[in-house]
């Protein structure tokens, strides 16, 4: 019995740390979706209400906005618990990985798929704290990914702008087509 009470106290104490931040972000997303409704959906004349293309998206987005606003009101009325900012910053740490991905997507058209992958795989391993032989394994993995995607799966990825610096001829064509 004391074990359950201890778990409930722990849960009750820590359950609302980042709730306010989440409620604000969720309401902001709901309002953006609500503002986009007129341009993203249409109401068709002489069509039944439930058959309207915009009806169910409107119901869901309006409900999302109402419940997000109620969640925000509940967050404001809940007791202030220390640690909300730390939890929000902990959540924001995941945005770093989205930034790495966006950088990779931005670099591929410039440096080419092969070079970008061979650079980013070890860089991500360095960011994770790996050193030594793991960087070689990451480079091998990057090379394997390029070979599998470009050669075996025939995925069409535009050639990098860096390949245009090669002299015209067979090497340049080979690099642009395969890497």
Image: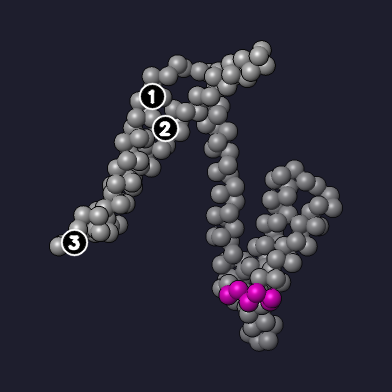
Residue 39 visible in image:
no
* Mark 1 lies on residue: 74
Report the magenta stretch's main SS: loop
The image quarter containing residue 64 is: top left
Mark before the other along the chain sequence, 2 or 3? 2
Q: Secondary structure at mark 1?
A: helix
Q: Secondary structure at mark 2?
A: helix
- Residue 76, given in percent of the width and then of the height, sits at 38, 22
Question: Is 146 drawn above or below residue 132 in the view shown?
Answer: below
Quadrant where the N terminus sits is top right
Which quarter of the picture shows residue 111? bottom right
Q: Is residue 69 left or right of residue 104?
A: left
The local crowd at label 1, few if under 14, some if 14 to 19, many if 20 or more residues have their Cα within 10 Å, is: some
Q: Which mark identifies residue 126?
A: none
Depicted 152 relative to depicted 58: above or below: below
Earlier along the polypeptide chain: callout 3 or callout 1?
A: 3
Residue farthest toward the front in the current orientation of the protein: 1
Separation of marks 3 and 1 at Cα, in angstroms:
39 Å
Question: Disc number at residue 47?
Answer: 3
| Residue 148: % across, % down | 70, 71
What is the spatial separation of the Cα atoms under label 1 and label 2, in whole angstroms?
Answer: 9 Å
Q: Which residues are magenta?
A: 151-156
Which of labels 3 and 1 is toward the front? 3
């Amino acid at each position: 019995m004391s074990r359950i009470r201890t778990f409930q106290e722990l849960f009750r104490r820590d359950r609302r740390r980042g709730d306010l931040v989440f409620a604000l972000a969720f309401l902001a997303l709901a309002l953006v979706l609500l503002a986009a409704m007129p341009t993203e959906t249409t109401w068709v004349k002489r069509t039944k209400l439930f058959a309207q293309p915009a009806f169910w998206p409107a119901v869901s987005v309006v409900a999302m906005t109402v419940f997000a606003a109620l969640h925000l009101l509940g967050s404001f009325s809940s007791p202030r618990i220390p640690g909300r900012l730390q939890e929000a910053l902990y959540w924001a740490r995941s945005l770093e990985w989205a930034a790495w991905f966006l950088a990779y997507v931005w670099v591929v058209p410039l440096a080419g798929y092969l070079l970008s992958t061979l650079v980013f795989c070890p860089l991500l391993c360095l960011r994770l704290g790996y050193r030594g032989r793991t960087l070689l394994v990451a480079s091998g993995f990057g090379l394997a990914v390029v070979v599998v995607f470009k050669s075996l799966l025939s995925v069409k990825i535009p050639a990098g702008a860096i390949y245009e610096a090669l002299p015209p001829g067979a090497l340049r064509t080979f690099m642009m087509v395969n890497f």
